[in-house]
Amino acid sequence: MTTRRNFLKGTAWIGAVAALSGSAKSMLKLGGTGTMSGFAAPALGRVRVGVVGLGMRGPGAVHRLASIPGVTVVALCDLYPERVAAQNAWLKSEGYPEATAYTGEEAYKALCESDLDLVYIATPWKLHTPIALYAMEHGKHAAIEVPSAMYLDECWALVETSERTGRHCMQLENCCYGSVEMFTLNLVRKGILGELVHGEGAYIHDLRSLNYLDPAAGGYQGYWRLKWNAEHYGNPYATHGLVPIMQAMNVNRGDRFDYLTCVSSDQFGMDSYAKAKFGEESWQAKLHPRCGDMSTTVIKTVKGKSIMIQHDVTSPRPYSRINLVSGTRGILCDYPLRVALAGSPVDGAHEWMDDEALGRLYGEHKHPLWSAAGEMAQEIGGHGGMDFLMDLRLCYCLQNGLPLDMDVYDLASSCAVAELSERSASNRGEPQDVPDFTRGGWETAKPLGIETIDDTMVARLKEVFIKGKKDDAQLNV
């Protein structure tokens, strides 16, 4: 399906993976399952985690993971020793054991080779796939920040390696654990919106100041995110708006993406910002990023559903993920949250519910994970609590030998939008087929249920959260 598969053969990082000893590869092949749909690895009991990347997102992950009962952060890795030292100082100050420190450009390899269970990857985008591949090749589960892969070849490599090694490869899509997104999923599973027909999601977030912020002052190291925008077109960051809709529509679990088309505006906002901020003769003003201000992708599924996904990190607009699902019995739309329901199959739904009725609906259909741990999640923080619930469910499933809420096929299907949208937008919206990463497994895979945690974990959490820790520094969802 993809024309870029040979990309892997000529890269240094995949060469390093291929250089693994034959005995190690033979051992890992024994764990292969053939499919990761519904896959459950052996229960771990205690989860030993190594965190790679301690810049913007990594520190928050360290704090959250350390707070989960049955989880130990045993290793920390970053290019810069002072970042590792800072997180070890935090662990020590909170009464947790210090982690083994790994520093340097390829220090992640030694971490992956060490004695742990899960490699949690919070590095710049281009490092996500190579680190995850190395982790799985060395028998570790991989959890990767978004987007986990930027090219179709990387998507396929993650799928094939996860299947062959029998190791989980999960994208850390925190927005699936937002209170509204989980409320939406519960409404859908109960049939309250009828059969879903259409969804809309987005990443609309004015990141101009952060993209151009000097790395020495807290910006992206080496301006890596700005450089991506300078070199690419289409939608590189689709997953926040897309994956919750995928779950609601059972994509890869009864349906799958068929094809997409993408149209992007030209780029105006970054040039305007750079000239005003740094002057006409600055390198920032002369960069002229390629990524359009507004990118709109429309996806059609095999079962006839449609999804619109937008990306805009340039325009002076309030933050929005849109978060809309429309069915045969009603519609839900976020930012702000609104719901309209038809009274019967022949009724219309021409007005939004008033605040009182909406409050009752939310109270009746609040997701049980938010009921069980939402208050504690908000206390620990991380985008209002959804980061913590994501990490909690991941570790809970690993501890108990349960399938994860998101598998490698969900990762690949959502990340494929980056390359496919760029191809489409660069060719006047030409439709692009989306690969079936499940290779037909979507037809029999079980949809995601309404999953939560058990009473024992709730009780253990309450003991931990008596201290009332809070870390809500990660604002850039």
Image (cartoon, helix red, strand yellow):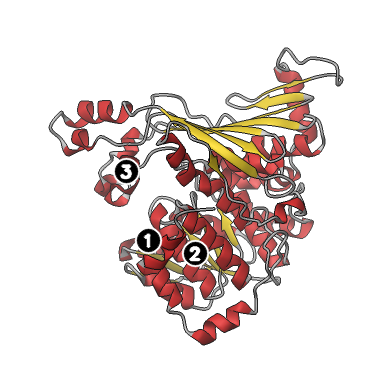
Q: Position of residue 286 (x, y in %)?
A: 19, 35
> Which residue sits at x=71%, y=60%?
403
- The image quarter containing residue 191 is top right
* Label 2: element kind: helix
Residue found at the very far bottom of the displayed protein: 23
From what the image shows, is residue 394 above or below residue 34?
Answer: above
> Which residue sits at x=73%, y=12%?
350
Q: Position of residue 119 (x, y in %)?
A: 51, 66
Q: Position of residue 422 (x, y in %)?
A: 43, 40
* Label 3: element kind: helix
Q: Nearer the viewer, residue 232 or 400?
A: 232
Contact (Cβ within 8 Å) of mark 3 with mark 1: no
Does residue 41 appear to the left or right of 9 in the view shown?
right
Residue 235, visible in the rendered structure: no
Whole-angstrom CA distance, mark 2 to mark 1, is: 24 Å
Q: Amino acid at mark 1?
A: Ala
* Pair 2/3: label in front: 3
Q: Amino acid at mark 3?
A: Glu
Q: Residues within 10 Å of mark 1 (few under 14, many from 20)?
A: few
Count of residue discs: 3
Residue 59, visible in the rendered structure: yes
- Number of the label disc, if any, that sits on residue 86: 1
Q: Residues within 10 Å of mark 2 (few under 14, many from 20)?
A: many
- Mark 2 vs 1, N-terminal side: 1
- Number of the label disc, if any, that sits on residue 132: 2
Residue beneath disc 3: 231
